[in-house]
Image (spheres, grey):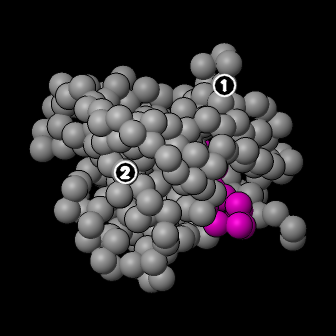
Amino acid sequence: MKKIKFNAVDWNYEKKEEWVCPSHQYQSPIDIVNNDTLPMNDDGDIILRYRKKANAIVNTGYCIQGYLNGVASINNRKFEFQQFHFHAKGEHTIDGKDFPLELHLVHQSESGKMAVIAVHFEVGAANSTIDDILSHLDESEFDNHINLLNLVPKNLDYYHYLGSLTTPPLTENVEWYVLIESMTLSEKQLQRMTEIHKDNYRETQDLGARKVLKKVFNQ
Ligand SMILES: [Zn+2]
């Protein structure tokens, strides 16, 4: 096991209004209005193959973030897994409802295209993987069997739209896949998470002319 420290960034959540936005057309997160979504006709399959071992878990100063090796096939295109991290409260809202926590699984294709899968968490049953992650904060090269798929619902139905990173540089052209089914963590786990970072979320942005697609498998 090795102790690690993340280099500080030059922005923070206290001064969100100072973040420089490349444009205001394709920003994230958004509020997803279920009744305004259109059915996604593409095959749209998501297949996640993540190694059951984290390489490192860090406190970036603005979120809890972890690294592991993995690949994903998203709508028949190959992506490399980059990192996962949490926002509290959640960033995307569904019909105006917000969630206490949101997990982002960040992927990148060979051509540089980014795809982020978002998983909402509600308070309920504890999730042991949350404890595993918290107990190894700021460590790398540690012995673990962290299985990120324990944080992902079995049902991968999702909302899909084109948006941006939700932290500077707010880069656009990011594909978002916001899973419809949410996961749970216990009140105590949420408390532990928010003792480290709370209010590390960006407010919802205007959808503008964009459309949100809804993919429901096995209909
Ligand atoms: Zn994020």
Residue 15 in which image quadrant: top left
Q: Position of residue 206 (x, y in %)?
A: 40, 47
Tell me: 138 left or right of 183.
left
Label 2, residues with CA under 10 Å away: few <14, some 14-19, many ≥20: some
- The residue labelled by disc 1 is 109
Point out the stretch of residues depicted in magenta: 152-163
SS state under label 1: loop
Q: Residue at x 32, y 48 (%)?
A: 137
Q: Residue at x 66, y 25 (%)?
A: 109
In what quadrant of the picture does the C terminus appear?
bottom right
**In the image, residue 159 lies in the stretch drawn in magenta:** yes
Looking at the image, which is closer to me, 157 or 134? 134
Q: Residue furthest bottom?
A: 124
Tell me: 69 left or right of 144.
right
SS state under label 2: loop
Looking at the image, which is closer to me, 63 or 40? 63
Q: Is 125 situated above or below 100?
A: below
**Residue 98 visible:** no
Q: Is 96 situated above or below 198?
A: below
- The residue labelled by disc 2 is 136
Q: Position of residue 29 (x, y in %)?
A: 42, 48
Choose the circle earlier in sequence order: 2 or 1: 1
| Residue type at numbered disc 1 | Ser
